Image (cartoon, helix red, strand yellow):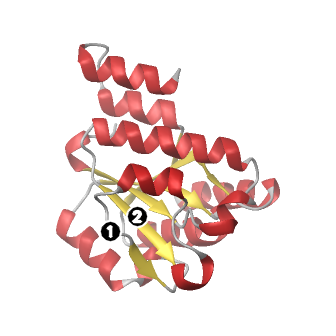
Amino acid sequence: MLDQKKSILVIIDVKGKLARIMHDSDKLITNLAILISGMKLLNIPIMLMEQLPDKLGSTIPKIKNLLTDHKPIIKDVFSCMKNDEFKNQINRIKPNHIILAGIESHVCVYQTAMDLLDKKHNVHIVVDAISSRTSVNKELGIDRMLLGGAVQTSVEMLLFELQGNAKGERFRKISKLVK
């Protein structure tokens, strides 16, 4: 089970025109917004990654507006683990569980997951908040991450697992987000 105090969410490369051409992009963006809002309610740390924003565009406004207090980590590599600033943050926070969401399933999300798994991190992939340009590549990326040892979850499953109980104002707010 996930623990609120020992988890972190990594949002990978939801940027520019690329975000809009993802398979089922509207649903992806909606799910990412719900995920981020829920994680903020749960006080889970969030890291925002951007690959080459000067060339590929920065994080799309619907996501960036939810993370105004988060400075993106800029990368020029597919795997976040090959970025020194990302590695330093992970080493500083020392999370037991690293939750991945974003694009693309078969490239940056996949390579990040595999590098994290190689370093013995517990990796959770939010399958309804991950996509690629084609459904085939989305599923291939997810399948390969699962074969490598990642755990799959969904936005709703993740938020309720981290919440842990059905009481209080935070539970009511999370319930409204996912309904």
Residue reaching furthest to the top: 167
User: Which quadrant, please, contains the N terminus?
Assistant: top left
Residue placed under numbered mark 1 in the picture: 71
Residue placed under numbered mark 2 in the picture: 48
- In the displayed structure image, the side of residue 167 where residue 147 appears, left or right: right
For image coordinates 44% across by 69% down, the residue present is 49
- In the displayed structure image, the side of residue 140 where residue 3 appears, left or right: left
Q: Disc 1, disc 2: CB below 8 Å?
A: yes
- In the displayed structure image, the side of residue 106 where residue 152 appears, left or right: left
- Amino acid at pointer 1: Lys
Q: Nearer the viewer, residue 30 or 105?
A: 30
> Does 27 appear above or below 46?
above
Q: Nearer the viewer, residue 170 or 65?
A: 65
- In the displayed structure image, the side of residue 72 where residue 150 appears, left or right: right
The answer to whether any part of residue 128 appears in the image is no
Q: Give x and y (percent) for residue 79.
A: 50, 77
- Amino acid at pointer 2: Leu
